Image (cartoon, grey):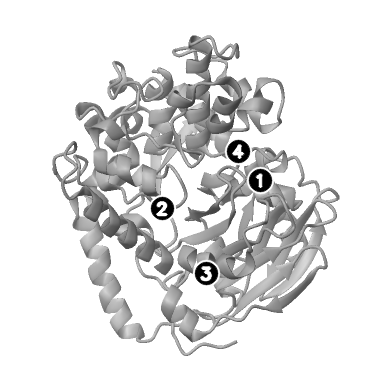
Amino acid sequence: MTTSFAGYMGKVVELDLTTRTSREYPWTDEDRRKYIGGKIMAAKVLDVLLTGHEEPFSEENPIVISTGPLTGTGVPCSGRFNISALSPQTGIVASSNCGGTFGYFLKKAGLDALIIRGKCDQHTWLEIDNGRFEFHSADDDGLWGLNVTPSQERIKELLEQKWGASRAFGQMVIGPAGENLVLFSGIVSDERAAGRTGLGAVMGWKNLKGISVTGNHEISVANPQKSREWNKKFFHMLRTHPLTGKQLPRMGTAGLVSPMQMRGMLATRNFSAGRFEHFDEVSGETLAEKHNIVNKGCVSCPIRCSRTVSLDGKSVKGPELETLGLLSANIENDDLELVLRLNNELDELGMDTISCAGTIAWAMEANEQGLWDCGLSFGNADELVQVIEDIAHRRGIGDELALGSKRLAARYGGEDFAIQSKGLELSAYEPRRAVGMGLGYATSNRGGCHLNGGYLVILEGLGLFVDPQTPHAKADATMMFQDLMEAIAAAGQCLFSS
């Protein structure tokens, strides 16, 4: 099905893993006009395909991987793609956004979106080449059971053996956490994660270890000359803006730790406080001074907010603000090197750092309250590397921690300090000091997410200075910001472009 719009490839494919057959999914220009792409497009597809009776772990639960019209066009910060399905963590339609290269190469393969249904009869990885699908055994090829980085390296090796040369391609994979159905497992493309809402477990249930994609289709723009002129202005604006041109390139999102501490917004001791006594040991300034090697960015991004740090002599991706705060202040851990290690371990195993850290903080308080004798306690984080490994492989207390804080609180008690919304653990912003952000957490359409909640904390002290504790106008501002965020994401851009 072709399109008259630039920015689109004009084709959406529905793939059935059970029968190994594919068909073109009907998606018209009227659909493109109404729903744009990304998460909004996926929501419409799921609205059509789901009846309301499906379970997250079922053949009837589709995974929708969708791009936006700006994805791959060279527009600043436009390398994003979306993954949506019923979430095993929240039980509702969920989505996760990613900055890896998979979305760009999906369009190079001639597809705007891929809808995956059914279940593989064995552990499988999928190869897409210019819209053609080939199934491979993840067991025979030695992929099942591997961590995220070795999985991607192995797929690269297999493809180069097949092609007899190196070609550019994108990929997305799950780690052991997804294979073992950890409810907050994610999906990784390159170093970037679609981490939230447990969609890695949906792939794992479908026996799908990963997908590679390549192609040589051209991604069109309506007016290349005007596009180049606009992009040049946009790049200049982002590079000269105080946030996107200075703070984020210098310290990444970790640079928000200090202002959050100053304003009492830094989640501490399972959100029982908003300031951490040893925050300076884990601040963005300390990370930049002692551990940062180089900055990286997603495709077509001038901001380059990602940190690369040294760990055991290797260069690995550093923590974002949410990970840094929740694995330090929120569990009372002032060892920054341990935070780097925990972050890398979670990435490699394929787990959402926010939900995992929030669940661990709940367990520490449950142990302190005498509700669950799990052996975890605030200020004692040395054993957490092993605990995280146990979660991914569903061993010992890890088998229960893999359920998340909402289900654990239903089992042991402690619902009042299970810090989640709709089953999704909150990110690192203390909502009692930013009530608009609290409203966003409560009304976000995927649960306790700062971005889908509208990120009103940026008005409440982390950029602008609206009174963070007044309710006045916060409902209207939250609605406006939520709509704005959704429109930007649907187009295929990173939300920092706002």
Is 282 drawn above or below residue 197 in the view shown? above
Q: Which of 443 and 228 is in front in this view?
A: 443
- Which amino acid, mark 3? Lys
The residue at 58%/14% (across/down) is 372
Please indicate, yes or no, whether residue 50 appears anywhere in the rendered image. yes
Is 432 drawn above or below residue 456 in the view shown? above
Q: Nearer the viewer, residue 123 or 247?
A: 123
Q: Which of 122 and 487 is in front in this view?
A: 487
Q: Where is residue 215 in the image (x, y as percent from the top left)?
A: 62, 74
Earlier-in-chain disc, 4 versus 1: 1
Of labels 1 and 3, the one closer to you:
3
Residue 451 numbered mark, or none:
none
* Residue matched to label 2: 297
* Residue matched to label 4: 348
The residue at 32%/79% (across/down) is 227
Give the left or right position of residue 164, taking residue 238 as reference: right
Earlier-in-chain disc, 1 versus 3: 3
- Which amino acid, mark 4? Glu
Q: Is mark 1 on a helix, strand or loop?
A: helix
Earlier-in-chain disc, 4 versus 2: 2
* Residue matched to label 3: 44
Is 212 drawn above or below residue 148 in the view shown? below
Count of marks, rendered view:
4
Disc 3 packing (10 Å; few <14; some 14–19; many ≥20): some
* Residue matched to label 1: 201
- Which amino acid, mark 2? Gly
Q: Quadrant of residue 384?
A: top right
Disc 1 packing (10 Å; few <14; some 14–19; many ≥20): many
